[in-house]
Amino acid sequence: MLRLDKFLCDAKIGSRSQIKGYLKQGFVKVNGEIIKRPEHKVDEEKDQVFFQGKEITYKKYVYYMLNKPKGVVSSTKDPRCLTVTGLLKDTGYDGLFPIGRLDKDTEGLLLMTNDGNLAHNLLSPKKHVGKIYYAKLAGPLTEEKRKELENGVDIGEGTLTLPAKVEQVTETSIHLTITEGKYHQIKRMLWAVGNEVVYLKRIAMGGIVLDESLPVGKYRELTEEEMEAVGLRKY
């Protein structure tokens, strides 16, 4: 149960002071009844709340797909660089953070949310959530080196990387699927087999595929189907 004024604030109807004014003017109805008391309690999942005749949907958690550009850091704050949260400042939601990270020079799919449980589920090493990257390479990848990547390679941490999946796109580009998230992992894996990544883009994560119609640097809310793909229901 939430106070009505908090419910309306969270729904981005206005500030607390603005909402008190709206309530006094009789702009808000709960289950068909005009309510003027800001402390009135509402059940955000059951009660019907209307503001000036329009039903308000309460969203405790929000989920966005961002097509991250190069030059932006996967952080909530940075004193020197633009952050991914800075790209989503117009959502009106506080507390957004990226699920995992992409290197500053890496583009592509980044999920943004304020739902810590989803982040834990997608990032937990025990879950083995797949992440697919498109990588352009400095040189051709031989069949021998492809098998090395799929079996696991030494990137200097004492153990081999977990088995990966490699699909050849062109002679010098691949789709690489990994289930870990080590620092600079893709670049280090290709370096370990004598190659080099010259361009990197994440195209899928946990069943969600980057919307190719989404311009670089832009974002949108996840669709119902995408939310179901990561075990969520719409709102």
Image (spheres, rainbow, N blue to C red):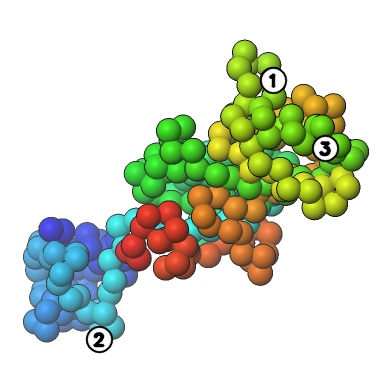
Quadrant of the snapshot with the N terminus = bottom left
Residue 178 sits above or below residue 56 on the image: above
Q: Position of residue 115 (x, y in %)?
A: 36, 48
Cβ–Cβ under 8 Å for marks 2 and 3: no
The mark lying in front, picked from 2 and 1, is: 1
Circle 3 residue: 143
Circle 1 residue: 154
Task: Give the residue type at disc 2.
Answer: Gly
| Residue 16 vs residue 90, the one in the foreground | 90
Q: Report the Cα–Cα distance between label 2 and label 1.
A: 62 Å
Task: Give the residue type at disc 1.
Answer: Asp
Circle 1: element type:
loop
- Pick out the residue farthest to the bottom: 53
- Pick out the residue farthest to the right: 139
Name the N-terminal-most of marks 1 and 3.
Answer: 3
The answer to whether residue 68 shows anywhere in this view is no
Is 99 left or right of 10, judged from the image as shown?
right
For label 3, the crowd category at 10 Å Cα-Cα, with few meaning under 14, some 14 to 19 and many 20 or more, is: few
Q: Position of residue 82 (x, y in %)?
A: 63, 45
Circle 2 residue: 53
Cβ–Cβ under 8 Å for marks 2 and 1: no
Task: Give the residue type at disc 3.
Answer: Glu
